[in-house]
Amino acid sequence: MTVNAPFVPPKPAPTPTHPAIEIVKDPKSQTIGEGDKATFKITVTNSGDVTLTDVQVTDPLSPQCNRNLGTLDVGQSKSYSCTRDNVKADFENVATASFTFVRCMTADQIVGWLATYSGLITASGRERAAALAHAREELLPRADSDGLIEIPMRSHCWRADRTHRANP
C-alpha cells in the first residue's frame, strides 16, 4: 500500500518591485518681462513596475505649483499647468516628485533588512539577536496567507530643474 501526501504547489516568489518616477517641467527656459508671470507644464510619469500612491509634486519657489496627484498606475502620466505671478528677478525653479508604494516582504526579509540597514538596532551579540527575534515575533501576526507583510515606503525620487529669466 502506498500513501501519498496531497500535492501542495510551492508558493511563488514575491514579484520584485522597482518603483520609479519621472518629472518633466517645461519649458526648460523662458524669458519674460519683469513683473510678468512664468507658466509651467509639469508632467509626472510612473516609470516603475509598481503602482505609486500619494504622488506629490513640491515646488518651493512656486508653491502654487504644488500638487497631490494621487495614484499613478504603471506607465501612467499626469500633467498640469501652473504659473508664478509677478516675477521680478531671474530664478532657477526646481520641482520634486515623491510617492508612496507598498512593498511586500516576509518577516524574515524585514528582519534581515533591519539587521543590515537599520541604525536602530546597534546592540551586538545576544542583545542584537534578541532584538531581531523580537522584531520577527511582532511582524509574523501581520503576514497574509502567503507570509507577506505590506510595508508602506516613501521616496523622493526626481527633480526637474528649470531656469527662468525676467528681463527688465
Image: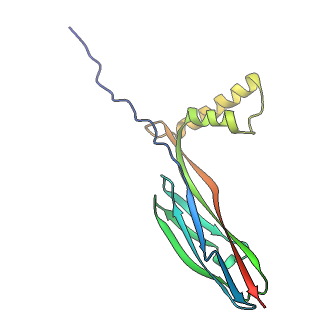
Task: Judge whether 162 appears above or below 131 on screen.
Answer: below
Residue farthest to the left, as pictured:
1
Image quarter in which the N terminus is found: top left
Q: Quadrant of the C terminus?
A: bottom right
Give 62 or 163, whichever is nearer the viewer.
163
Pinpoint residue 57: horizontal percent, then vertical percent. Answer: 62, 68
**Who is closer to the viewer here, 8 or 26?**
26
| Up/down of 97 relative to 25, above or below | above
* Res. 80 in view: yes
Q: Position of residue 3 (x, y in %)?
A: 25, 13
Q: Can residue 85 be seen in this view?
A: no
Q: Which sits in the foreground, 1 or 91?
A: 91
Name the residue rendered at 77%, 33% in the picture. 122
Q: In this view, does 119 lie to the left or right of 58?
A: right
Q: Is residue 168 left or right of residue 149?
A: right
Q: Which residue is drawn at 49% across and 39% down?
A: 148
Q: Viewer-proximal residue, 98 or 127?
A: 98
Question: Where is residue 79 shown, x and y percent of the image?
Answer: 52, 73
Question: Could you tell me how many numbered marks the image carries?
Answer: 0
